[in-house]
Each structure stands twice: as structure tokens, then as C-alpha cells.
Amino acid sequence: MMMLDETAFKTFLQSPKVTVWSRLLLIAVGLGYGLISIVANWAYVSDFDSQALRWVVVPGIFLLFGLLMAILTRFGLSLLLWASSRGLGGRGVLGEISKATSVSLLPGILSVPFLTGTANGLMIALLVAGLIWMYLISVQVVKATQGFDAKKAYLTVALAFVFLASIYYIVVPA
């Protein structure tokens, strides 16, 4: 699925264990978000005098917020894909979209270093690569769940990403 194989998405969605795999993938992405945040903020984490705070509590908070970020991102992206699919005449089955959207979050891990405040050239390149890859996976999700042709799927995801970018622009402080 990460290589954008259309039949892999359909097979994934028809699997009896799709819910389990989707949740495991979401947990893995959330832990990835948290681990990258710990590494990016290691100077802050290592400043604590207490060993329990340095090695358990503060990293645990970062991991918890990484999981929360993954859950909220999946929820938001699922709703946006659902809304744009419905707007363009799709079936709009939110449950199917949500399960498949977990796969779309994997490339998002590439953008976490940029979001944690590291804005060098490599991080910007990873951000762009991650967003493009996420976009292409989301197109496959829409094609598999809505039965859209490629043109309609690309338009659906473009609408969702434009709205997502505008929300990000409004919410994130300057």
C-alpha cells in the first residue's frame, strides 16, 4: 500500500482484520510522532534533575501526545476526505475511509521534525516529500473506498488538503 498499489488497498479494506491492522498502524504512527518529538526536544527532556522525570514521565507525555496527534490527524483527515467525497457524489462511507486513512498517516512521520521546530533544508525536503506521499496515498484511499476514477480522486483529495492547509494556517501561531 505504501507503494501506491491499488489492489493492495482493496485487499486491505476487505480483510477481516482491517480494524485491528488500522489501529495497530495508528498506534505505530503515534509512537513514531512521540519518539521524534522526544529526540527533537532532547535538550529540554535531559534538563530534568529527576531520573523519573527524564526517563519516564516527560517521554511518556511526549508519547501520549504523539498518539493523540495521530488520532486527531486521522479523525480530521478522514472527515475531510469523507466530506469532499460526498460533495463530489461518492458513497462517503466514513468507517471505510477512516480505516484506510491510517495508512495515509505513515508518510506524515517525515514531516514531524519540521513541525517540532527544526526548519533546515533537509527537514523542509522531508516535509514536502511526506506531504506528496500522503497526498498520493490518500488518492488511493479515495479510489478504493469511493470507486472514483483517478481524476475525481485527485480532485477530492486536493479539496481536502486545501481545507486542511487552511485550518493549519488558522490554528498554528505565526
Image (cartoon, rainbow, N blue to C red):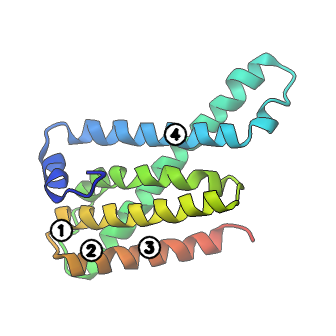
Please state which amino acid type lies under the numbered disc 3. Answer: Phe
Q: Could you tell me which quadrant the C terminus lies in?
A: bottom right
Query: Residue at 33% across / 65% down in the picture?
Result: 136
Please state which amino acid type lies under the numbered disc 1. Answer: Gln
Query: Residue at 43% across / 37% down in the picture?
Result: 27
Disc 1 from disc 4: Cα separation: 29 Å
Q: Is residue 99 above or below residue 38?
A: below
Whether residues under marks 2 and 3 lie with C-beta atoms below 8 angstroms apart, the answer is no
Q: Quadrant of residue 53?
A: top right
Provide the residue designation for mark 2: 85
Q: Residue furthest front?
A: 122
Q: Is residue 162 above or below residue 171?
A: below
Whether residues under marks 2 and 4 lie with C-beta atoms below 8 angstroms apart, the answer is no
Disc 3 from disc 4: Cα separation: 22 Å
Please state which amino acid type lies under the numbered disc 2. Answer: Ser
Please state which amino acid type lies under the numbered disc 4. Answer: Gly
Instruction: Assign a secondary structure to mark 1.
Output: helix
Disc 2 from disc 3: Cα separation: 12 Å
Q: Is residue 70 above or below residue 127?
A: above
